[in-house]
Amino acid sequence: MIKQDIKIQSSEGSAFDCYFVTPSLESSAKVPAVVLASAIHGVDQDLRDIADSFASRGVIVAAPDLFWRTVPGPLARDDPRSGPRGKPRLPVIKTGERDLVDLLPVLRQQPHFNGRTAVIGFCYGGPYGVLGPARLGYDAGMSLHGTQMLDYITELDGVTKPVCIIWGDQDHLAPANVLDAYRALPARMPNVEVHVLPGILHGYMMRGSTTAFDAKAYDFSMQRALAMLDGLR
């Protein structure tokens, strides 16, 4: 695979950083892409490792720095700047939507791209797993231990594209009312799957979290993500 740190031209006129990974493929192969919307820590080693894992399975991967307007780059888990750079939350998420749209033309330029893209949001970036297929031009979306997700549940009204939402039932940032609201969706929306994993904490996908990372939950989430991406092939 080829790993690169590239610049994406923003529709605002500036450029932002993006970790971009292309898999090793036969010359005639056409594959989907996945965009990873990071947690508040940004495009750190945990997210790069996840990107590499997807690419090793034959998927084009982009992980943009969605915090380039505030405090750019990856941050350590105890970095005090991580809080301020994500506030005020709703406007920060909104501006990030433009970045996800600006990424799509770059993907279309890739010779192996089949024209179909999923977005996976982690923690702070979780809402993009809903917003991507709802109105940003993405073909599927996934949210893994997403936060403030109740603000975006109505975005799914009328959406028919695949959406997958996963939390742990011990996630302190996903209270019972949020879990219950999303659990009710699959009964009326067969395109939406919701999983609440027993005994799993917030941030379970991140290997750098010595307290939250859970290998079984990670593997389950990757399996569901790869199944979603297989549907885009």
Image (spheres, grey):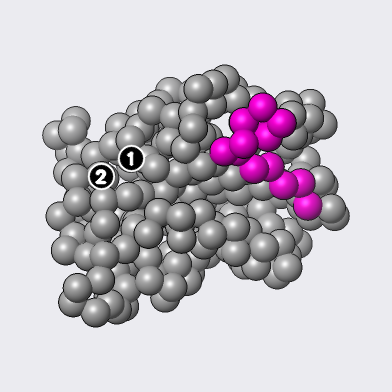
Callout 1–callout 2 Cβ contact below 8 Å: yes
119 vs 188, left or right, is: left
226 vs 181, left or right, is: left
| Chain part drawn in magenta | 185-197
- The mark found on residue 104 in the picture is 2
Q: Amino acid at mark 2?
A: Leu
102 vs 74, left or right, is: left
Tell me the element at label 2: helix
Q: Quadrant of residue 5?
A: bottom left
Residue at 28% across / 37% down in the picture?
Answer: 101
Tell me the element at label 1: helix
Residue 224 vertical position relative to residue 157 in the rendered view, above or below:
below
Q: Which residue, given by chain and number where applicable, does mark 1 sit on?
A: 100
Pointer 1 local density, CA inside 10 Å: few below 14, some 14–19, many at least 20 = many
Instruction: Say if the magenta span includes residue 190.
Output: yes
Q: Quadrant of residue 60?
A: bottom left
Instruction: Say if the magenta span includes residue 122.
Output: no
213 vs 106, left or right, is: right
